[in-house]
């Protein structure tokens, strides 16, 4: 059976996709708004913001970069990247002092996961904005 | 910041709903495909939620 290789598409200049991806990081769905995909941008903004706010309201904790054994390093750095990926939501939370210490409890644990997942979903939204800006997707 | 408590089911349902919306939007190329894929992912989340929930209940007796 013949093996087909995916065609490698050239990456367009950063000026084409950079602003959409940067705005997409800062404001969830912002890249889609910039690229005139307002409906999708609004849904992304609402979904990611609601997830983040529920994470805060259930007293989820923000990760901080912390090293130690490999698992601790992976969890804390990975969680920190996930938190930071929420853009302005993360920055406002830290600046306004809503970042809370880690407390034991199932609900708070859900909250921590909600906060990280909001950032990870925003990374997916940024990748989508990149593909639209690069002309790989409508 | 107001505080709230969610049950396991409420938190999992909310997570499934919001994640499905985003996954539906970013995964496909037409609006129809996005809608179907979002619904499909949401269904998979719920199936896993109830399936694993029952497994844990049966496992614990």
Image: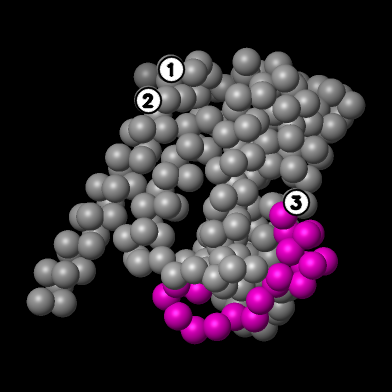
In the picture of the structure, the residue carrying the numbered disc 3 is: A87
Residue A106, relative to residue A39: is it above or below? below
Q: Which residue is the extreme one toward the right? A: A15
Res B6 → quadrant: bottom left
Q: Secondary structure at mark 1?
A: helix
The answer to which image quadrant residue A126 occupies is: top right
Q: Position of residue A33 (x, y in %)?
A: 73, 27
Which residue is found at the position 57% from the left and 34% from the top? Answer: A43
Any mark on residue A115, and which? none
| Residue A8 image-quadrant placement | top right
Question: If the image is split into quadrants, where does the C terminus of chain B sit?
Answer: bottom left
Q: Which residues are magenta?
A: A89-109
Q: Nearer the viewer, residue A33 or B48?
A: A33
Q: Residue at x 42, y 25 (%)?
A: B35
Q: Which residue is mark 1?
A: B32
* Quadrant into which the N terminus of chain B falls: bottom right
Q: How far apart in space, not on screen, are marks 3 and 1 (Cα)?
A: 30 Å
Determine contact: label 1, label 2, CB under 8 Å: yes
For mark 1, name the chain. B
Report which residue position mark 2 lands on: B36
The residue nearer to you, when weighing A20 against A41, is A41
**Image x and y of residue A54, in percent:** 54, 59
- Do the residues marked 3 and 1 share a common chain? no
């Amino acid at each position: 059976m013949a093996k087909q290789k995916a065609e490698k598409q050239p990456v367009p200049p950063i000026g084409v996709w950079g602003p959409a991806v940067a705005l997409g990081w800062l404001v969830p769905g912002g890249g889609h708004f910039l690229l005139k995909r307002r409906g999708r941008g609004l849904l992304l903004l609402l979904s990611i913001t609601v997830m983040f706010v529920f994470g805060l309201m259930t007293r989820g904790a923000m990760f901080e970069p912390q090293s130690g054994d490999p698992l601790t390093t992976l969890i804390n750095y990975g969680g920190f990247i996930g938190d930071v990926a929420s853009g302005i939501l993360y920055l406002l939370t830290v600046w306004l002092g809503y970042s809370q210490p880690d407390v034991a409890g199932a609900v708070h644990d859900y909250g921590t996961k909600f906060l990280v997942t909001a950032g990870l979903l925003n990374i997916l939204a940024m990748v989508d904005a990149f593909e639209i800006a690069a002309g790989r997707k409508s | 910041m107001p505080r709230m408590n969610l049950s396991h089911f409420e938190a999992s349902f909310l997570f499934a709903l919001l994640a499905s919306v985003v996954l539906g939007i970013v995964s496909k190329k037409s609006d129809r495909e996005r809608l179907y894929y979002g619904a499909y992912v949401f269904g998979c989340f719920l199936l896993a939620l109830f399936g694993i929930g029952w497994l844990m209940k049966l496992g614990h007796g």
